[in-house]
Amino acid sequence: MILHGYFRSSASWRVRIALALKGLAAEQRFHHLRKGEQRAPDYLALNPQGLVPALELDGDVSLTQSLAIIEYLEESHPTPALLPGDPVQRARIRAFAQVIACDVHPIQNLKILARLRALDHDDAVVNEWARTTIAEGLEACEALISKEKGPYCFGDTPTLADVCLIPQLGNAERFGVDIAWPRIQEAAAACAALPAFQQAAPDQQPDAE
């Protein structure tokens, strides 16, 4: 497998965590988002959106969208399970993950912030947009897991929820969001102790700046 990504990309970070948790190796290729390398024609042939990540498989097959890639990994390598439990529990885990991947990250990512600046909003306004978006999303995430047993988001093993949470917390810290939610803090501490999360971190990637 070949994983196309960027060290700071939250979506790429999710896939790196999932690969590491499942003990899977993938060659990494890097596309510098701030330099527009994801718009190169050869990469657009893999991912017409010009976004990272993309995962190349044997047989000239490529997958895009981080959650779809992770679900593929879950189905093809089911142990350890990132979507454990009964159908209701799996739906709850997916819902938590989608709060981040569908409702928070897409409206505070690099592309959207660049468009806000292009509309003549200054950095203070742009950064406040990101902070507010992230804080509102994490507030909802805290409520979704407030009654779930820890130490991870949904029990005693990391799930897709944790895989999405940790990169979003990286964004939160970058924009100055105070991570004051107790269950989120508990899950983050549990993840931080695992080698899979440590080796997937942005500062551990060969393209880190």
Image: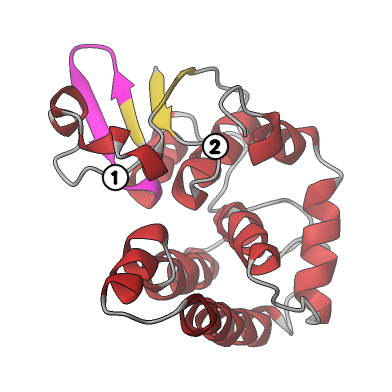
| Viewer-closest of 159 and 117 | 117
Instruction: Establish if 39 lies above or below 206.
Output: below
Residue 10, position as x, y percentages in the image:
51, 51
Residue type highlighted by circle 2: Phe
Q: CA distance from mark 2 to mark 1?
A: 13 Å
Q: How many C-alpha atoms fall within 10 Å of the one at disc 1: few (<14), some, or many (≥20)?
A: many
| Viewer-closest of 204 and 192 | 204
Residue 29, position as x, y percentages in the image:
42, 21
| Viewer-closest of 145 and 171 | 171
> Cβ–Cβ below 8 Å for labels 2 and 1?
no
Instruction: Establish if 49 lies above or below 40.
Output: below
Residue 96, position as x, y percentages in the image:
52, 71
Any part of residue 150 in sight: no
Range covered by the magenta-colored residues: 56-66
Q: Residue at left 37%, top 82%?
A: 121
In which quadrant of the rendered view does residue 104 lie? bottom left
In which quadrant of the rendered view does residue 205 lie? top right
Kindly state the secondary structure of the residue where label 2 is placed: loop
Q: Which residue matches tag 2?
A: 7
Q: Which residue matches tag 1?
A: 51
The dot on residue 59 is none
Q: Is residue 15 left or right of residue 145?
A: left
Residue type highlighted by circle 1: Leu
